[in-house]
Amino acid sequence: MQRLAIHIRGIVQGVGFRPFVYNLAQRYHVTGWVLNNSQGVEIEAEGDSPAVLRFLEELSISTPPLAVVEEVIVNPVNLHGDTEFIIRYSREETQKTAWVSPDVATCSDCLREMTDPENRRYRYGFINCTNCGPRYSIIKDVPYDRAATTMNTFPMCPSCQAEYDNPGDRRFHAQPNACPECGPAFRLLTREGTPIACDVFRETRQLIAAGNIVAIKGIGGYHLACDARQEQAVSQLRTRKIREDKPFALMCGSIERIRQLCNVSKEEEILLTSASRPIVLLAKKAGSDLAQSVAPDTDFLGVMLPYAPVHWLLLEDQDVWVMTSGNISDEPIVYKDQEALQLLGRIADYFLVHNREIFQQSDDSVVRIVGSRRQILRRSRGFAPKPIKISQEIPSILAVGGEAKNTFCLVRGSFAFMSSHMGDLENMATYEAYLAAIEHYKQLFSIEPALVAYDWHPEYLASKYALSLPISHLGVQHHHAHIASVLAEHDICEKVIGVAFDGTGYGCDGTLWGGEFLVADSTDFVRLGHCKYLPLPGGAKAIKEPWRIAAWVLYNLYGKEFAAFDIKLCHNLSPGWELMVQAAAKGINAPLTSSAGRLFDIAAGILGICHTIHYEGQGAIALERAGHKQYGDVLPYEISQTSPYILDFMLTFAALTEALRKGSSVDFLAACFHATIADAVVTMVKKIQEDTGIRKVALSGGVWQNATILRKVFGILQQDGMSVYTNELVPPNDGGLAFGQAAVAGACMRKR
């Protein structure tokens, strides 16, 4: 006979792990007990040695679908002579190290029950079990028990309680368990908040079909929904939401409907149907029935399948609805009912609401497949707060992230807990939500950081917050953090050639970097090359108005005579452009930048593709769309002969201008620009490789969301025998910055 004390850590709460252990004990005739505690799951198992060892082996290899076993600690203990195996009440401890599951899409078993007229949960909008349903969005604290969730206000009826208490039932200890008799319910309201007596799901479908906009409360917040085939409804949503051009996300009623709209690869279908249910960027098919204003000026659609019961009850197989975040542009997603009526009442005609509280908001995640590799563009619902494993244990760290696309990161031991997508912190509502989320994470995972890592930019609100904390501080250069995020993902300890291409990051010399070639490890970096500094005429206005920096480039190439060129840019020059470029030449209101992102703006401006922008990266996206179906020639560019190498594209812009004036097509020239950027990156990397002998390359920063450039550079470098690494677990944009900051801080602490 043998008795073992077994401690299991990972995502083992809220995923049916205790009933799994209970039923495993019955199979092997093992006695003892299992319980949740603040660190995971604790088991004591007693029986004859072969049975106990088989029981132990099965704990790791036959786990429930949503469980993630990270660590199993086993110690022999004295025999107790138990006669049965029981599930004990949870035990709360001071040190909380239990992981929290992300919110999970409705499983096939629950869908089958929800559509069965004979089932007591027929058409019930909150159906769930241990294999699916809300988790992170309703959890207030660990261990994960009903009392620590927003379901604590809904006492179970006898039928639900019987399921909850039955170890053989799929809902055994499913904390959100409920039914129409005892659980939360939906109501349909006017924008004034007046309830409408009706079958809420059928009525909502009819309202959408009639061209209305409906705010729908889901798992992590509100969506704004309308029929994606009705141009008037979609245009009205754009106007009310103040969202001029940025594409809307779509929800389709079936994978077959998605296939009618988009090309879907096997890898993309796996993402679409996964338990995370992210928005997946897919290539559009021609001739769809969608409203033109759903996704203007892009060849891609962001599409997702239903993931909450309410979505399945609303959408039929052939439906396709706009399902965009419930907010005013640039503000955080709304998740509180009273705020929804106040803030979204200006947008939505009706509200489909429910009375289960959302404790922590969580926006939809956005993912794409590039080649065969996953690229996360926004890591949120379905992914957070699942931690990311790092190679070595480090003391507790808070990394506060950047200003735009903010996430933060808390590290404990060898795990990094990334937050959901927070948004742009210059918005006050977002900043307040950010501060509250940090405190929630600290409490939930029992992490009290000993050090805070932050970006060098002196005006970032996240950095100012970090410096206000009464703990040790470590500033991390923006582009070093980008490259370090790749190194941490792939467990790379040696130096690499890092190509950090993005829009803006504060540099060591006080200028705005963004086109950087670094030799870096996780502790330090050396800048061995960069794109040539260019001024931003008018400062931040140049980022919103690409014509400004394009005009400056042409002024420097041709003088003021360029204004007479018969090209679209010159036809649309704003009054006072000459004073603007002359002021920039004198350094007046024209900060210098080496940003690769601005190179795309210049090309888009010269080619007349994008004069002004309404969302970040719009010029680059339009430029990629113009050229991605063409084969382009490599245009001339210059690289200085000594290190640090300066990459100069003025010859490229001259060649673009001359070819455009001679009648070359815009699409062909856009393809040429992409081919030139890719060729220049590869040439620079090879120069640095020859100087250093380093053959590992890390690519990070928002520019690497450009699939055309990424495929070209990745492919050429691999063909030349280089090992190339990109972000796959966190976004390459600033949404992954906090993870890189934490990696640098951890490496520096280990080194010290």
Image (cartoon, helix red, strand yellow):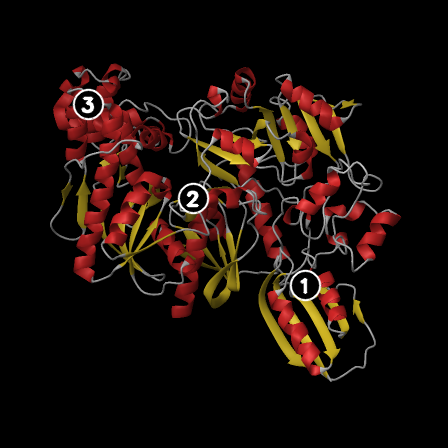
Question: Residue, x 17% and y 53% (percent of image)?
Answer: 687
Q: Residues within 10 Å of mark 1 (few under 14, many from 20)?
A: many
Nearer mark to the viewer, of 3 and 1: 3
Q: Are marks 1 and 2 in contact (CB under 8 Å)?
A: no
Q: Which residue lies under the disc numbered 3?
A: 664
- Nearest the viewer among 744 and 183 is 183
Q: In the visual, does 528 lie left or right of 376?
A: left
Q: Are marks 2 and 3 in contact (CB under 8 Å)?
A: no
Tell me the CA gap for discs 3 and 1: 66 Å
Q: Residues within 10 Å of mark 2 (few under 14, many from 20)?
A: some
Q: Which residue lies under the disc numbered 2?
A: 369
Q: Position of residue 385 (x, y in %)?
A: 57, 52
Task: Tell me, yes or no, if residue 386 can be seen here.
Answer: yes
- Does label 2 or label 3 sit earlier along the sequence? 2
Q: In the visual, does 603 lie left or right of 45?
A: left
| Residue found at the far right of this picture | 158
Quadrant assignment for the N terminus = bottom right
Q: Which mark is residue 38?
A: 1
- Nearest the viewer among 602 and 277 is 277
